[in-house]
Image (tube, rainbow, N blue to C red):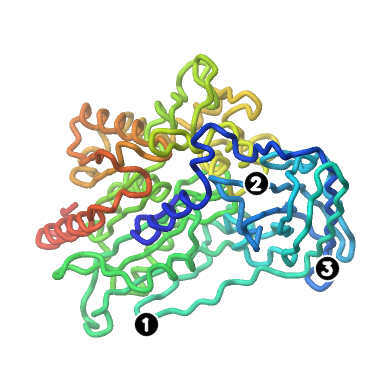
Amino acid sequence: MPAPSKLLIRFFVLVLFLTGCQRSAMGQRAGDDPSTQDTAVTVTVRLSPDVADGPLSGRLFVLFSKRQRTPIKGPNWFSPEPFAAADVKQWEPGKTVTLPTDALAYPKPLVQMAAGKYYVQAILRLNQDFAHYKNGPKNLHSVPKVVKIDGGNASSIELSLAMQVDPPPVNLPPTAKIVSRRSALLSDFHNRDVTDRALVLLPPDYEDQPEKQYPVYYEITGFGPTIEDMLERHQESVVGTDDVKFIHVFLTGQTQWGHHVYANSATNGPRGDALVKEMIPEIEKQFRAIAHPYARMLGGHSSGGWSSLWLQTQYPKFFGGVWSTSPDPVDFRDWQGTNLYERNANIFTDSVGNRKPLAIADGKPILWYDSFSKMDDVLERGGQLRSFEAVFSPRGDDGLPAQCWNRGTGEVDPVIVEHWKQYDISNHLQANWAKLKDDLAGKLHIFTGSADTFLLTKAVGLLKQRLEDLGSDAEVEIIDGRNHFNMFTDGLDDRIYQAMAEKFSQAANADASTAR
């Protein structure tokens, strides 16, 4: 889910259009194809000695596409094409692995693939720090190959993992810097070196005024983008007004599980603490940032909207204000259409057995929760739903994030929900309001659309009512007619930057020791 930039919003709107979401909107499940016939698709993958010095373990993916010449860029949420996965252990260089006929696959088993010409590609996920396998340095992949699947006839496909994902080239303009540092907190938690990164965009007058200090806007991206993605989309960024300029810092939340949303968790580790205790002090040390709470502003869209709101409510004295747009569910009484606290809650179907959508367009479903959950489980890591579990769930006996709902029936596990409850922002505010109210006064600003694509509107409405009942001065606005991807078409971003600048100016002109 995207970060709050006009360019990225336009990109996702284009994706919605090009990927055929209207086909799903009419009720046809992704992958349904009347021409599909059972066929014997055998995929054999060789691990080239050129890219592996010893045995490797990881998750092997084989992806097919009729549209995409580089299938490992998929799957597309709104129009997924066939892909399959299998875990491999101690795979020796030079040896081959044949994908099991019953391998996890989506949208359908490989034996039910539609006939036709496909591009096919394999990739072995090894990297533990990036959400998407195509972005993870040292992941191994094959060269894309064209194959023909004949319905009802055997198809044998041979691929070779002979290439490695390399770090993308970085060309920094003069006003952009990348902060990359080893996190002691995260490294200790994961028992390996973990590098934390941030993109810093400096105001155009930064070098010309060597004595000037600046406030900082920490913007957390939505689900997916990397530091390099944000650099490509934002070669320069002017945040503020003519009189007040901010240093603009992009934070991505990248982890092998998806987006860690800067929350301390059993699986992702102390992500919030690492930001507040390590990364931000480093940024303030390297750049002329004003190291006071009133000069640290937060914002983000979608998963970034949830992250920024979470950080403000968890570290209320540290940050000076948050402008959260279209956040992921902020009140678990409405988790994209499901009250997680309700007895016999089911995330797949309603009380009469009708399927629940996960996303809508023009009031019609374009994604269904049950099918999206199945796709997410084939990915296993790096998908949106498992990303939530990696943050909110305890670890299971297998060491992995415990599943919140039954993957076959959609039934929600109330024991796991009880653990999730601590991450329910609305619940957290209500339970701790006496301690939080003074430190959050004037700091909470939340915006969403009345027709959010991912059904996030009602949760914001519940939070709005709860804050009003608590007597909060929070600004919570539900903008009529807006969805997840067109929130900024009427200059909402300019409104936010203006509000940040005004708040900073008011605080800077007051006693910094007492200003919020």
Residue 276 seen in this snapshot: no
Element marked by disc 3: loop
Q: Are marks 2 and 3 in contact (CB under 8 Å)?
A: no
| Labels 1 and 3: the sequence-earlier one | 3
Residue 128: x and y in percent read 63, 57
Q: Are marks 2 and 1 in contact (CB under 8 Å)?
A: no
Residue type of the residue flagged with mark 3:
Ser
Disc nearest the viewer among 2 and 1: 2
Residue type of the residue flagged with mark 1:
Pro
What residue would you read off at disc 2? Answer: 379
| Labels 2 and 3: the sequence-earlier one | 3
Relative to the observer, which residue lies in front, 352 or 433? 352
Residue 26: x and y in percent read 51, 34
Disc nearest the viewer among 1 and 3: 3
As drawn, the label of residue 174 is 1
Q: Tell me which corner region of the image, top left, top right, bottom left or bottom right, holds residue 53.
A: bottom right
What residue would you read off at disc 3? Answer: 48
Residue type of the residue flagged with mark 2:
Leu
Element marked by disc 2: helix
Relative to the observer, which residue lies in front, 340 or 21? 21
As drawn, the label of residue 7 is none
Residue 263 seen in this snapshot: yes
Residue 434: x and y in percent read 25, 32
